[in-house]
Image: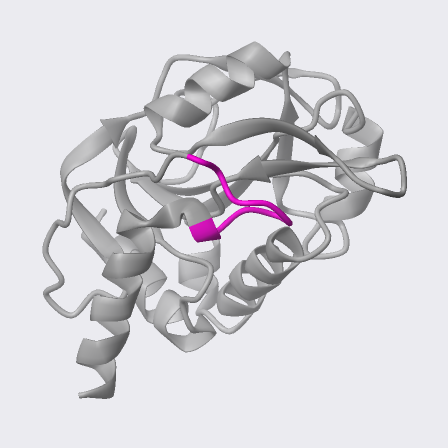
Amino acid sequence: MRGLLARIGGLLAVMLLGLTACGSAPSRPVIVDEGQSDGWTGTRLDNPYQVPDASFTDTSGQSYNLRTSPSTPVTLVFFGYTHCPDVCIAVLSDVAIALKRSEQAVRDRVTVIFVTTDPSRDDPGTIRAYLDRFSPDFVGLTAKLPEIKDVAEQLGVVVEGMKKLPSGGYEVGHGAQVIGVADQQGVIVWTPSTPVGDLKDDLARLVAEQ
């Protein structure tokens, strides 16, 4: 019963993804295909997202193509920013813990990609220092904001504009789902509320399928 309730809750969260933004919610909900549960905690998509043939700059200053550069059969894609006060830290921490608890054979077949939604502040060096807090293996990418928004939209992620804060700074509203990619398609989506143990199990299953 707990597993069923978790899947139902996760599905509702994916369908009303306005809640998963760092500090402020996107004004437009992201509606994704309900897919099939079949024991998955994440939402498997009946109509997968097609990963766009888009090139970014990674934290070493090299070109990185989102579709062709990953060398592992499974890729996890997450959009966020280093000044995010809450959700991004929680999501990246959960992903890092899930992988750390996974078998080495699973870890070796998964690439985690972080795409900044705040390129004006997140230069490659800043992104690298941020990601190293979670794992030195995480790939960090940046590009011009319109390009980032376009790619995010193709993967079902809303990236909103800046919201000024009383302190004089700003935050960036964005969807905080993690997209699991296999065969250059986004085939499964996890919400920030996904338990680490369930994410670990889903990753092992997704890797085993490839």
Return the residue found at the far bottom. 1
Q: Position of residue 134 (x, y in %)?
A: 69, 57
- Asked if the magenta segment contains residue 20, the reply would be yes
Q: In the picture shown, does residue 142 fall above or below 136?
A: above
Q: Where is residue 37 in the image (x, y as percent from the top left)?
A: 13, 62
Exactly how many numbered labels are in the figure? 0
The part of the image, by quadrant, that contains residue 157 is top left
The part of the image, by quadrant, that contains residue 167 is top right
Name the residue: 25% across, 30% down: 49
The part of the image, by quadrant, that contains residue 202 is bottom left
Instruction: From the viewer's perspective, tell me whether residue 65 is left or right of residue 5.
Output: right
Name the residue: 39% across, 56% down: 191
The quadrant of the image that shows the N terminus is: bottom left
Q: Main secondary structure of the magenta part?
A: loop
Q: The magenta stretch spans which residues?
A: 19-27
Q: Position of residue 47 (x, y in %)?
A: 13, 34
Residue 65 visible in the picture:
no
Q: Position of residue 29 (x, y in %)?
A: 35, 40
Instruction: From the viewer's perspective, tell me whether residue 113 is left or right of residue 42.
Output: right
Out of 209 and 48, give the one closest to the viewer.
Answer: 48
Name the residue: 89% across, 35% down: 168
Out of 67 and 192, give the one closest to the viewer.
Answer: 192
